[in-house]
Image (cartoon, coloured by chain):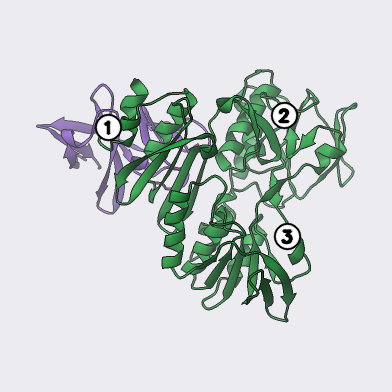
Chain colours: A green, B purple
C-alpha cells in the first residue's frame, strides 16, 4: 500500500491500514522534511506561543517504527505507472503498489497580481508559519488578503502580537463561504473591537514593492502600505500528478462514495478529492477540513482493504479567533430556514433546516468550546435526517439530547 | 493515601453528562453515567489539553469537544485517533449526596 501525501489524511490512512489488520508494506510519501505534523495550529498557537514553536507531530517516530510504516520525507512522487502499478520518486526510486492513495491535500490559491512581490506570502507549511511569525512584531503593518478562516485566524494572531492588521475582502462580508451572516457579524465585530481594519467589497489593483514593504493599490483608489501581505483567498487541490496519470479530475480528484478514483486500485481522500456527500443526496463537494481529512483517510484505508464502505459523515469544521470558538456541522447553504438557540454567555447556535423540515446544518459561536456539545448533537441529528420540532430547537431549556432520543 | 475531596453534589450533574472540577491547581472531569454511577478522570484531553467537560457524554464515552478524541471515562481507555494516550481515572464515591474523588 502506498500513500502519496503525509498530512493528516495520509497519516491517518497509514495507521488505519494497520488498525484494520493489514500486514504488508505501507509506504507514506511526503514532500516535507519533518515528521508528519498537524496544520491547524500553524495559524493559531504557532503564531502566538511565547516559546519558539516546533511542529506538532501527528505521531511519534517510535509509533511509525512500531507500526512498520515506511515514512519517506523530503520526497516527491513524479509519475505513476498504473499498468505496472508503480510510483516513481524524484530520486529515481520505484515503489510498487497493490493499492494507491492520493492524500495530496490543497495548496493556497495564488493571487497572480502578487506573484512578483517579495513582501507577499501564503501559509501552508511550518516554514511558512515561522517566516510569518517572525514578522508579527509590535507596530508591524500586516495586510491580509481574504477574509476567510486562515486570514482571520492570522489577523487575530497578529493582533495578539501587537501588529496592526488590515483585512481586505472582495465580497460584501467576511467568511461568505460556509458561515452564516449572523455569525460572521459576531466575528467581524470582535476583530474590529481589537482594532483590526476590515475592508469589504474591496478589490486589489496592484502590488508595488519597495525595499522594505509593499504598496497595495485598492479598487477604491486608496493605497495601503504593508510590511507583509498574506494571501488567504482559498485553496486549490493538488491534482497535477493525478491528472498526469490520466485519472479523472475536476475541482479535485474525482472519487465515488468508496473514495475510489476512475482507477479501482487508486483512491483519493481529504482536501484533494471531490466526492459525493451522501447526507445531501450525493451532492459533489470538496472539503478543506481537518476532520474530513481524518475520516476520509481512515475510510480510504478500510476500502483499500476491501471494505466497500460508503462515505457517510457529516462535514464538520471549526475556527478559533481570540476567545471565540466557531463550529459548523453540515453545509448551511443546504438550508432554507434558520432557527436560533441561545446558550448564554453570548453563545448561540443557528439550526439550518431544509424546506422539508430536515435539519441539514448547525452553526455555533461562543466563548471557548461552549457550543461544542450541542453542535455534536446537531451533527448526529443531521446524520439521521431528523426533522426536529422548531419550537424545541429554539428553546434553550429543551435538551438537544432529548431530541436525539425522539 | 485516602485523600477524598468533595467535587460536587450528585444533583449537580445530569445523567449521562459531565462537569469540570478544579482542585489544587489541577482540573478534573466528573461524570454521571446513564445508569447513575459517578466517575472521574483528568480534566484535559491527552491530545491537545482541551477541557473534556465541554464535550459530549454518550453511554460510557466522553468525546473531546475539539477533535472528537474518544475515551471510556470509566476506564480512561483512549478509543482511537487522534487520541492514543489513556486518560487517568480516579476512584469516586457518593456519600450523603456528595460526590467525592480520591486524589491521593
Asked if the residue under mark 2 is in contact with the one under mark 3, i.e. CB atoms within 8 Å, the reply is no
Give me the chain letter of mark 1: A
Please report the residue visible at 34 percent of the width from the left and 20 percent of the height from the top: A406
Above or below, comparing residue A358 to residue A274 in the picture: above
Above or below, comparing residue A406 to residue B14 in the picture: above
Q: Position of residue A268 (x, y in %)?
A: 72, 33
Instruction: Give the Cα distance between marks 3 and 2.
Output: 28 Å
Query: Disc count in the image?
Result: 3
Q: Quadrant of residue A8?
A: top right
Give me the chain letter of mark 3: A
Asked if the residue under mark 1 is in contact with the one under mark 2, i.e. CB atoms within 8 Å, the reply is no
Please report the residue visible at 61 percent of the width from the left and 30 percent of the height from the top: A298
Label 2's element?
Answer: loop
Please report the residue visible at 63 percent of the width from the left and 58 percent of the height from the top: A232
Q: Mark 2 highlights which residue?
A: A255
Q: Are marks 1 and 3 on the same chain?
A: yes
Q: Which mark is residue A111?
A: 3
Depth check, front residue: A6 or A268: A268
Which badge, 2 or 1, comes first in the chain's sequence? 2
Above or below, comparing residue A314 to residue A50 in the picture: above
Amino acid at each position: 500500500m502506498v500513500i502519496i501525501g503525509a498530512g493528516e489524511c495520509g497519516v491517518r490512512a497509514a495507521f488505519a491500514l494497520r488498525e484494520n489488520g493489514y500486514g504488508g508494506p505501507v509506504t507514506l510519501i511526503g514532500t516535507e522534511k519533518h515528521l508528519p505534523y498537524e496544520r491547524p495550529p500553524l495559524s493559531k498557537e504557532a503564531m502566538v506561543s511565547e516559546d519558539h514553536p516546533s511542529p506538532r507531530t501527528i505521531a511519534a517516530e517510535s509509533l511509525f517504527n512500531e507500526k512498520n510504516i515506511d515514512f519517506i520525507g523530503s520526497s516527491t512522487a513524479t509519475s505513476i505507472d498504473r499498468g505496472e502499478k508503480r510510483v516513481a520518486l524524484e530520486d529515481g526510486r520505484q515503489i510498487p503498489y497493490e493499492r494507491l492513495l492520493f492524500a495530496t491535500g490543497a495548496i493556497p490559491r495564488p493571487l497572480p497580481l502578487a506573484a512578483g512581490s517579495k513582501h507577499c506570502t501564503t501559509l501552508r507549511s511550518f516554514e511558512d508559519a515561522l517566516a510569518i511569525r517572525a514578522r508579527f512584531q509590535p507596530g508591524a503593518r500586516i495586510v491580509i488578503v481574504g477574509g476567510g478562516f486562515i486570514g482571520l485566524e492570522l489577523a487575530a494572531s497578529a493582533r495578539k502580537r501587537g501588529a496592526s492588521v488590515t483585512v481586505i475582502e472582495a465580497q460584501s462580508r467576511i467568511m461568505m463561504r460556509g458561515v452564516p451572516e449572523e455569525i460572521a457579524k459576531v466575528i467581524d465585530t470582535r476583530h474590529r473591537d481589537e482594532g483590526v481594519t476590515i475592508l469589504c467589497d474591496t478589490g486589489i489593483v496592484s502590488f508595488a514593492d519597495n525595499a522594505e514593504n509593499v504598496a497595495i493599490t485598492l479598487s477604491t483608489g486608496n493605497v495601503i502600505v504593508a510590511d507583509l501581505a498574506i494571501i488567504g483567498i482559498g485553496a486549490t487541490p493538488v491534482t497535477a500528478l493525478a491528472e498526469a496519470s490520466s485519472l479523472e479530475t475536476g475541482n479535485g480528484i474525482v472519487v465515488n462514495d468508496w473514495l475510489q478514483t476512475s482507477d479501482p486500485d487508486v483512491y483519493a481522500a481529504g482536501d484533494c478529492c471531490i466526492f459525493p456527500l451522501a447526507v445531501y443526496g450525493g451532492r459533489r463537494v470538496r472539503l478543506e477540513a481537518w476532520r474530513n481529512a481524518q475520516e476520509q483517510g481512515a475510510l480510504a484505508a478500510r476500502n483499500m482493504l476491501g471494505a466497500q464502505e460508503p462515505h457517510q459523515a457529516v462535514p464538520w469544521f471549526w475556527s478559533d479567533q481570540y476567545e471565540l470558538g466557531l463550529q459548523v456541522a453540515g453545509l448551511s447553504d443546504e438550508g432554507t430556514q434558520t432557527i436560533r438557540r441561545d446558550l448564554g454567555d453570548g453563545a448561540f447556535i443557528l439550526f439550518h433546516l431544509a424546506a422539508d423540515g430536515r435539519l441539514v446544518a448547525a452553526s455555533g459561536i461562543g466563548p471557548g468550546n461552549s457550543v461544542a456539545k450541542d453542535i455534536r448533537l446537531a451533527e448526529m441529528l443531521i446524520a439521521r435526517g431528523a426533522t426536529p420540532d422548531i419550537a424545541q430547537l429554539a428553546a434553550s431549556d429543551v435538551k438537544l439530547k432529548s431530541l436525539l432520543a425522539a | 493515601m485516602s485523600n477524598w475531596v468533595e467535587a460536587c453534589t450528585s444533583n449537580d450533574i445530569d445523567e449521562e453528562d459531565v462537569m469540570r472540577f478544579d482542585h489544587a491547581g489541577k482540573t478534573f472531569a466528573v461524570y454521571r453515567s446513564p445508569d447513575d454511577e459517578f466517575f472521574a478522570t483528568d480534566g484535559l484531553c491527552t491530545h491537545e489539553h482541551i477541557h473534556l467537560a465541554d464535550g459530549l457524554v454518550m453511554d460510557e464515552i466522553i468525546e473531546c469537544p475539539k477533535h472528537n478524541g474518544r475515551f471510556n471515562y470509566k476506564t480512561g481507555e483512549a478509543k482511537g485517533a487522534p487520541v492514543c494516550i489513556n486518560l487517568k481515572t480516579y476512584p469516586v464515591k457518593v456519600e450523603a449526596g456528595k460526590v467525592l474523588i480520591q486524589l491521593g
